[in-house]
Amino acid sequence: MSGQTPGWWVGFWEYLEESEREALISLGRKRVFGGDSVLLHEDEPSSHVLVLLNGWVKIACNDSEGREVILAIRGPGDILGEMEVMLEDPRRSAMVKTLINKVEALVVPATAFTRFLDEHGNAWRALYLVLAYRLREANRNAREFGRIGVRQALARLLLGLAIRHGTKSADGSITVQLLSQDEISACIWASRDAVAHELVELRKRNALITGRRSFTITDVEEIRRIAQAGDF
């Protein structure tokens, strides 16, 4: 293992030993995707996996009414498309698209990736840890879906993004430049109006400052308290 403390923000790449990273790099090729680019298309045949080296993407699909639903946000170190290469009918289950800026990813053919796993036992463990966390996260979301309000769901999302992607200032505030308000709404399966209302309330309480595709948590403890309890 790489020696990093496991946590929800740790990706597949960080779990690998340096020698394993070098071996995986030798099997693939690095590719840069521009902003607003689709890396993987829903329902397309699966022929490769991606390891994000820099930049952020959203995993999304459309609901029955054609609205975008964001299933997850992935960033540096995360692996994409790994499940499909293991299945007998390997078609992509969702779309993967870049957020804001360009993304650099390692593209590894499916056959080369499965061979890599067979030859590196720790890589199998790394993949297992990533999949186990994602399953636990999905189970938690399913358990809580419909049981928590927009306010609490929003606070949890903002706090999670701040932990993983935020830039902390000397005064303790944390800034994240990543999602639009529409994308925030899609992440928590709420209407844009409902999210806008809660953002206004958080601004009134001096807990949050919002900008174009950015937000700054100015009172981390307040956001954490709402994330846990749901009330103001």
Image (cartoon, rainbow, N blue to C red):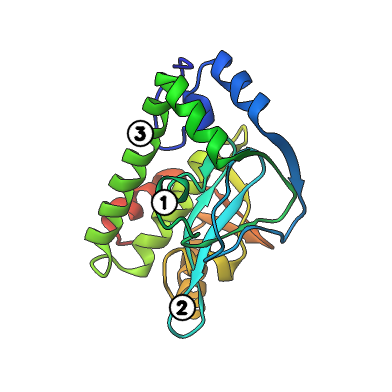
Measured in 3D between alpha carbons, the distance from the residue under mark 1 to the one under mark 2, in whole angstroms, is 20 Å
Measured in 3D between alpha carbons, the distance from the residue under mark 2 to the one under mark 3, in whole angstroms, is 35 Å
Which sits earlier in the primary sequence, circle 2 or circle 3?
Answer: 3
Question: Pointer 3: what residue?
Answer: 128
In the figure, 106 relative to 120: above or below? below
In the figure, 128 relative to 147: above or below? above
Disc 3 residue type? Tyr
Q: Residues within 10 Å of mark 2 (few under 14, many from 20)?
A: few
Residue 106 screen position, x and y as percent: 66, 37
Disc 2 residue type? Ser
Q: Residue at x 46, y 36 (%)?
A: 9
Which of the two residues, 181 or 77, is positioned nearer the viewer here?
77
Q: Quadrant of the C terminus?
A: bottom left
Q: Residue at x 42, y 58 (%)?
A: 89
In the figure, 122 relative to 132: above or below? above
Q: Where on the picture, by quarter, is residue 28?
A: top right
Question: Pointer 1: what residue?
Answer: 223
Q: Residues within 10 Å of mark 3 (few under 14, many from 20)?
A: few
Q: Residue at x 40, y 44 (%)?
A: 221
SS under mark 2? loop
Which sits earlier in the primary sequence, circle 3 or circle 1?
Answer: 3
SS under mark 1? helix
Q: Nearer the viewer, mark 1 or mark 2?
A: 2
Numbered mark located on residue 191 in the image: 2
Which of the two residues, 230 or 99, is positioned nearer the viewer here?
99
Disc 2 + disc 3, Cβ < 8 Å: no
Disc 1 residue type? Ile
SS under mark 3? helix
Q: Residues within 10 Å of mark 1 (few under 14, many from 20)?
A: many
